[in-house]
Image (tube, rainbow, N blue to C red):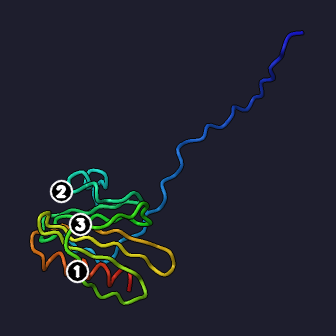
Amino acid sequence: MAATTRHDDSSPSVAGPPASPAVPELRGLPPYLRPVDATDAVLRMARPEVVPTGNRSAYEGAGPVSRVVVVFDFEAPRGLPGTPREVAVPTRAEVMATDEPATSTAYLSAWAPDGRCWFIAVTAVEAEIRSSTLDALIEANLG
């Protein structure tokens, strides 16, 4: 007995790649920074291996701050390079912040009480600029 195959007029739908998750907006950025490809920006960093997996965004520009990389809802948190620094947090969020002069980068990992988390790297030549920019980002996004 021969096997038969039924052919319908409708063709099966082909599933495309899943939609990228929406990346939240990062508030408090210096106005001269513009969005750039996050993968390329991470690869231009002095220490790309520090940036965790997650929903990444990046901003670069010609100003005192040259780059900001942010990862929302990051996975595999790691320790941060550099010297620990204190930061003021206006909420009950838990934060870890460091500054690494050798790479001109300040780092932040933050965990909000609602379960959201952020990793932020700010690159600027001057430590005071890195610090004030990181503080402004904390206030705007965790406040």
Q: Quadrant of residue 11?
A: top right
Q: Which residue is mark 3?
A: 81
Q: Secondary structure at mark 2?
A: loop
Q: Which residue is mark 2?
A: 46
Q: Secondary structure at mark 3?
A: loop
Spot occupied by residue 101 in the image (x, y as percentages of width and height) = 12, 69
Q: Residue at x 32, y 84 (%)?
A: 139
Spot occupied by residue 51 in the image (x, y as percentages of width and height) = 31, 59
Tell whether label 3 touches label 2 (CB within 8 Å): no
Q: Residue at x 65, y 37 (%)?
A: 13
Q: Quadrant of the image for the C terminus?
A: bottom left
Q: Quadrant of the image for the N terminus?
A: top right
Tell whether label 1 touches label 3 (CB within 8 Å): no
Q: Residue at x 43, y 72 (%)?
A: 117
Name the amino acid type tagged 3: Pro
Using the numbered discs, state the Cα–Cα distance from disc 2 to disc 1 in whole angstroms.
20 Å
Name the amino acid type tagged 2: Ala
The outermost residue toward the top is 1
Q: Residue at x 23, y 80 (%)?
A: 85
Q: Quadrant of residue 27?
A: bottom left
Sequence-wise, which precedes: disc 2 or disc 1? 2
Using the numbered discs, state the Cα–Cα distance from disc 2 to disc 3 in whole angstroms.
12 Å
Instruction: Count residues near mark 1 (Cα–Cα under 10 Å), then give few for <14, some for 14-19, many for 20+.
Output: few
- Residue 56's disc is none
Q: Which residue is mark 1?
A: 85
**Foreground of the two, 77 or 3:** 77
